[in-house]
Amino acid sequence: EQVSFAAGGIIDAAARPYASDAFVYLAPHGNDTQLFLQRLDTHALLALTDGSDVDGIPLWAPDGKRIVFTSSRGGGGVYLLDTATPGALPRLVAAGNGHRWRICDWSADQHRLLLGREPDTGGASTPAALYIADIDSGTVMPVGGGAAAGNAPVHAVAARFAGHGRGIIVL
């Protein structure tokens, strides 16, 4: 059964975890991209972003209420959006500042994000320096302590929080 009807097609989509009543998808919008939330029962469509920036593939929070995504808006960065609040605006979690972010994972407690930071010239298979962003405080700290702690940040092609939440699995 066809569930999406975007005129320009869909770049990527992700089902809402657990509830399975909706999905969010990324669609082309001219030279930019736009995020939409679509209900499965009614096919009702809600634009989450306005299509005036290049938004990236979204990742749902484990509770299925919020998404995070990369975007070119405001100089680039990682943004958080509450899909349960009508009219909510994306909130900056980690600024771009001359580099590009990869979103690796949400923590089980949903208060932290595992991010990869790479130069703007990097690609999907380029190892990225790992960082943990605290969603509540807005702090972004390198995994491994970073230069301030006398350690180089950990680099990885892919990474996830361990299931118990006290470690990180890296590739």
Image (cartoon, rainbow, N blue to C red):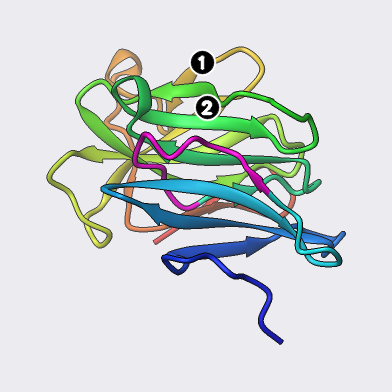
Does the rendering let one see residue 104?
no
Quadrant in which residue 72 is drawn: top left
Magenta region, main secondary structure: loop
Does the rendering let one see residue 74?
yes
Q: Give the SS element for disc 2.
A: strand
Give how far across and how far down residue 109 sits, in percent. Answer: 77, 37
Q: Are marks 1 and 2 in contact (CB under 8 Å)?
A: yes
Q: Which residue in the structure is indicated by mark 1?
A: 139
All told, the count of numbered labels is 2
Vertical relation: 40 (above or below) 100 = below
Vertical relation: 39 (above or below) 90 = below
Pick the quarter of the image with the N terminus. bottom right
Q: Which residues are magenta?
A: 46-57
Q: Which residue in the structure is indicated by mark 2?
A: 133
Relative to 70, 38 lies left or right: right
Which is more toward the observer, 164 or 99? 99
Q: CA distance from mark 1 to mark 2?
A: 6 Å
- Classify 10 Å Cα crowding around label 1: few (below 14), some (14-19), many (20 and above): few
Find the residue positioned furthest to the left.
121
Query: Which comes before the other along the chain, label 1 or label 2?
Result: 2
Pick the quarter of the image with the C terminus. bottom left
Relative to 102, 113 lies left or right: right
Vertical relation: 81 (above or below) 7 = above
Query: Which residue does the image show at 51% across and 15% down from the upper left?
Result: 139
Quadrant in which residue 151 is drawn: top left
The residue under label 1 is which amino acid type?
Thr
Is residue 116 covered in magenta? no
Is residue 53 covered in magenta? yes
The residue under label 2 is which amino acid type?
Ala
Give how far across and how far down residue 169 sits, in percent. Answer: 52, 56
Which is more toward the observer, 155 or 93? 93
